[in-house]
Image (tube, rainbow, N blue to C red):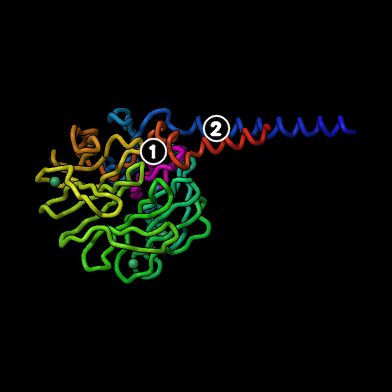
Amino acid sequence: MKLKQKFAYTALSCMILLIGLVLLMDARAQAPEQAKIAFASYRDGIYEIYVMDADGKNQHNLTNNGSASDAHPSWSPDGQRIAFDSSRDGNKEIYVMNANGSNQRRLTDHPAEDWEPSWSPDGQRIVFVSDRDGNREIYVMRANGSNQRRLTNHSASDREPSWSPDGQRIAFQSKRDGNTQIYVMDANGLNKRRLTNHSWKDYDPSWSLDSQTIVFTSYRDGNEEIYVMGADGQNERRLTDNPRNDFDPAWSPGGQSIAFASERDGDVEIYVMDADGNNQRRLTNHPGMDMYPAGFDPAARLVSPAGKLKTTWGWLKRTSQ
Ligand SMILES: [Ca+2]
Ligand SMILES: [Ca+2]
Ligand SMILES: [Ca+2]
Ligand SMILES: [Ca+2]
């Protein structure tokens, strides 16, 4: 009897280990092996989600539905999936797809506009914008679309949420003090506070990997430029200096560079620069508008405080003991 129990226990352990390994291999099969940038492009006559290598090579269309606008890509922290918004059902909804464009499915289902998704660093939740309660507010839901609830509650427009990589805070832009400025709140929606205070608009916040710095767009110089500041709103400094618009900054998860959109060459293209603003270079070159870049770097996944693979390995280790 004891031997039988031991055999059953061993068989069960092996089975669980096998399932775990299959899940892990599946995760690795779907996540890109090298750094990628997803973005939205108008080159096909309507916005589609594209992906390219970090050096601009291998650009291809992931959504490819032709009839509706797909924009605002956001990578899951493990690189397996991309959340985005789409108007394919008549109004904007949040969708998710695998990193190769397969298995596109809807997460929200509301007659109001739902858009601008951003994944939590543990991969469990997605923060987004909706005007379902009469004006633009920030909402959060589980990554499968369940348990949707509101985090802001203000008559002014609240938009562009960005979850800090340490999971603690959500940066966003709000008009609540008259003009669009950058704010931050705890991940549960409490403790909202303003980070920028300028007579011209500041918007599009994106966090550095260490959650210490926020990159954003400002109109304070008479055209859009990219700025960075500390997570407390101190030490603002300009990274771009170009008479045309520079906007949509997105920190690469590896922390080495910042992708952004710029009109400096006539139409909107995706550019990248070092985190200090040096070495600005163009990645796309197409007469259609290319914007909303979002980076994924498999190297960053290993150092991420909420790295999903590490969790999986830990679980496997515990299970096999
Ligand atoms: Ca909707
Ligand atoms: Ca609001
Ligand atoms: Ca500029
Ligand atoms: Ca272009």
| 303, 123: nearer the viewer | 303
Q: Is residue 21 magenta?
A: no
Task: Judge whether 195 appears above or below 54 on screen.
Answer: below
Q: CA distance from mark 2 to mark 1?
A: 20 Å
Q: Secondary structure at mark 1?
A: loop
Left or right, 107 with respect to 59, comes to: right
Q: Secondary structure at mark 2?
A: helix
2 vs 1, front mark: 2
| 246, 226: nearer the viewer | 226
Taking the spot 68% from the left edge, 32% from the top edge, the residue there is 321
Label 1 environment density (alpha carbons within 10 Å; few <14, some 14–19, many ≥20) = many
Q: Quadrant of residue 210?
A: top left
Answer whether residue 91 is visible to the viewer in this image.
no
Any atom of ligand 1 within 8 Å of the CB at mark 2? no
Any atom of ligand 4 within 8 Å of the CB at mark 1? no
Magenta span covers which residues? 63-83
Residue that mark 2 sits on: 26
Q: Is residue 82 magenta?
A: yes
**Where residue 149 appears, x then y in whole percent?**
47, 63
Q: Quadrant of the N terminus?
A: top right
Disc 2 marks which amino acid? Answer: Asp
**Where residue 181 appears, x then y in whole percent?**
24, 60
Taking the spot 48% from the left edge, 46% from the top edge, the residue there is 122
Label 2 environment density (alpha carbons within 10 Å; few <14, some 14–19, many ≥20) = few
Task: Judge whether 103 appears above or below 221 on screen.
Answer: above
Residue that mark 1 sits on: 62
Q: Quadrant of residue 257?
A: top left
Taking the spot 80% from the left edge, 33% from the top edge, the residue there is 8
**Where residue 208 appears, x then y in whole percent?**
32, 43
